[in-house]
Image (cartoon, rainbow, N blue to C red):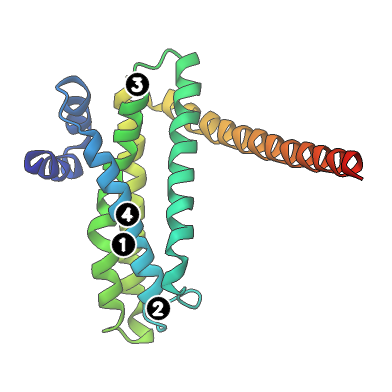
Amino acid sequence: MVAALKYQFYILFRPIDGFYRLKNEKRGRNSITILNLFLFWVSYSFMESYVSFTVAVRAPAIFRNSLINLLGIVAIFLLFCIGNWAVTTLMNGEGKFSEICMAVSYALFPMLLIFIPATLLSHLLTSNEAAFYTILVGASIFWFAILMFLGILVMHDYTVFKTIMTFFLTILSMLIIMFLIMLVTTLTGQLWIFLRSVYTEIVF
């Protein structure tokens, strides 16, 4: 477990070789995938709730909304992984669903390292120094995007252009999945109302 945690630092600075070993040498762990999601939820909720007013884009949220954050993070994570797996299956991708999940979760590591320290730092900055906080958080998000891109590229053994196309189609598939979920939910609700009204009429 300790070795698996340390391996994330290797991926930070040598992502292509790191993700290659993660896939081919089985260096990844599903437990780290779940742990990273949990830690990202904690760090993001902490930042959203306790960031200083001097650097906040909007008013900090109350921490009780952290459960909503958790549901949102898990939903987006699963939507992306399912959408990417569906698209790459049709495009001869070599990555398994579990490997896609690992690549995305391991890519979250820069934000896990930076969000909480940046939040604490925000209370030491004046409004004129807020750019330091913005640069720090922006750099972690950019780092995450690069790692996720390279992770998907390596997992499926794609070219750069094919990976870009994969991301575009993944986003499209996520929208389609969301539409289907909303459609099924709406139809199920209407069916329930209809059955309840029929039952009520029969009773009366």
**Viewer-nearest of discs 3 and 2:** 3
* Amino acid type, callout 4: Phe
Query: Dots 2 and 4: beta carbons under 8 Å?
Result: no
> Left or right: where does residue 123 sit relative to residue 80?
left
Q: Quadrant of residue 184?
A: top right
Query: Dots 1 and 4: beta carbons under 8 Å?
Result: yes
Q: Residues within 10 Å of mark 2 (few under 14, many from 20)?
A: many
* Amino acid type, callout 3: Lys
> Left or right: where does residue 156 sit relative to residue 62?
left
Q: Which residue is mark 4?
A: 40
> First in sequence: mark 1 or mark 2?
1
Residue 155: which numbered mark, if any? none
**Residue 169 position in % (x across, y down):** 54, 29
Q: Can I make out residue 150 in this image?
A: no
* Amino acid type, callout 2: Val
**Residue 196 position in % (x across, y down):** 81, 42
* Amino acid type, callout 1: Ser
In space, the residues marked 3 and 1 are separated at their CA atoms by 28 Å
Where's the N terminus, which quadrant? top left
Q: Which residue is mark 1?
A: 43
Query: Dots 3 and 2: beta carbons under 8 Å?
Result: no
> First in sequence: mark 3 or mark 1?
1
Q: Which residue is mark 2?
A: 55
Tag 2's secondary structure? loop
